[in-house]
Every structure is written in C-alpha cells, then in structure tokens.
Amino acid sequence: ESNTGGTSTFRILLEVVQTLALAIVLYFLIDFVVARVRVENISMLPTLQPGEFVLVNKMAYKLGDFQRGDIVVFHYSAQEDYIKRVIGVPGDIIEIDTGQVRVNGQILEEPYISAAPQYLGAWEVPMDSLFVLGDNRNQSSDSHRWGFVSEQSVVGEALVVYWPLSEAKLLSQPLTVKANN
C-alpha cells in the first residue's frame, strides 16, 4: 500500500509555506526600496492634495544626486515627515522678491505653484543641504521659514500619486529658468 494522501498533503503544505515566505521576502524588499506616504497638509497644493498617497523611491539619492524640481520626503522631526520641492542644491544662491524665485540669478518657471510668493529673502545653500519650498508658497512651512534641510534627513524622492486612483499621476517636474532678455 502507498501513502499518497500524506505525501500530497505535505506537498501542498510545502507550497503554501514557500509562497508565504516569498511574499514576506518580496514585501521587505519592496519596503526597503519604496515608502508609502500619506499627504497630510496643504503645503504642496495644487500638486498634492491632503489625503493622497504617494510612492517614494528610497534609493533615489543612494544611486543619484538631488535635482532642482525633485519632490522629496524628509524627516523634519522625530515624529514628522515633510514633503516639499527641491529649489536649491549645495552652492546655489536663492533669492525671492517681487513674487519671483531666482536660483543663481535665473528666474524659475513655476507653473505648478498655487500663487507667487509674497515674501522676500536670500539664502546660500550650504554643503550637504537643500533649500526646499512647498508649491503652496504662501501657506507652507519650509526653508524660507526654518532654513535648510540636511541631505541625510531625506527619505527619498516622491515618484507617483497612487491613491485615490482618480488622482493617480507621475510627479516629475524639472525646474526650468526663463531666458534672460
């Protein structure tokens, strides 16, 4: 007599265990590379709405450099992460006046902002730091209020809004400058 019933039960159980193990490994691999972040406030309007969920590439700056225009998530405090747009990288001179943002003397084209900034200031971005602003310039707590963001505090680059599905979109928006006339 053969015991095929016990062997097939063992094989099914082995398949289930292997599938669960693979799912767990994939979950942690994906979690190592991608973060999921919920937008909590209005500082990035109109680009990001409160309640939207965003995928963040945690490897972006381990493999590449920060670019002006990147939307980044960073640790603001031990309890809170912020999401803002990179305006200045190390060595840049940022000037804001008459409702315009200049980087190294060049006016930025910013079709994504909710309104022109109603504040002024000038900053030189130190090494290993970033100057970040919210797209909702006048309602955003950002570098114009509290200074620079350490590159080490950046979690990663926001890539895509994935929820709600009706708002799904890619978040790439390189900064461009107006030609000097």
Image (spheres, grey):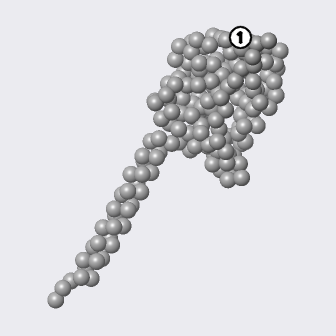
Say whether residue 78 is visible: no
Q: Quadrant of the N terminus?
A: bottom left
Residue placed at 57% from the left, 34% from the top? Answer: 157
- In the image, residue 25 sits, relative to residue 4, either above or below, namely above
Mark 1 lies on a secondary structure that is loop
5 displayed left or right of 162? left
**Residue 71 position within the rendered picture, expressed as x and y whole percent measured from the top left:** 63, 32
Between 176 and 93, the residue placed more toward the observer is 176
Q: Residue at x 79, y 18 (%)?
A: 100
Q: Quadrant of the C terminus?
A: top right
Q: Residue furthest left?
A: 1
Residue 13: tell me if it is visible.
Answer: yes
The quadrant in which residue 48 appears is: top right
Q: Position of residue 166 (x, y in %)?
A: 71, 52
Q: How many marks?
A: 1
Residue placed at 42% from the left, 46% from the top? 29
Give amino acid for label 1.
Answer: Gly
Of the pair 70 and 109, the residue shown nearer to us: 109
Q: Is residue 79 above or below residue 21?
A: above
Vertical placement of residue 175 versus 181, above or below = below
Q: Quadrant of residue 42?
A: top right
Would you say 167 lies left or right of 71 here?
Answer: right
Residue in the image at 59% along x and 25% along y:
67
The residue to which callout 1 is attached is 105
Relative image position of residue 13 (x, y in whole percent): 32, 70
Q: Is residue 31 left or right of residue 91?
A: left
Count neighbours of disc 1 (C-alpha within 10 A) and say few if under 14, some if 14 to 19, many if 20 or more.
few
Residue 179 image point, x, y percent? 75, 16
Determine which quarter of the picture holds residue 46: top right
Report the residue that reaches farthest toward the bottom.
1
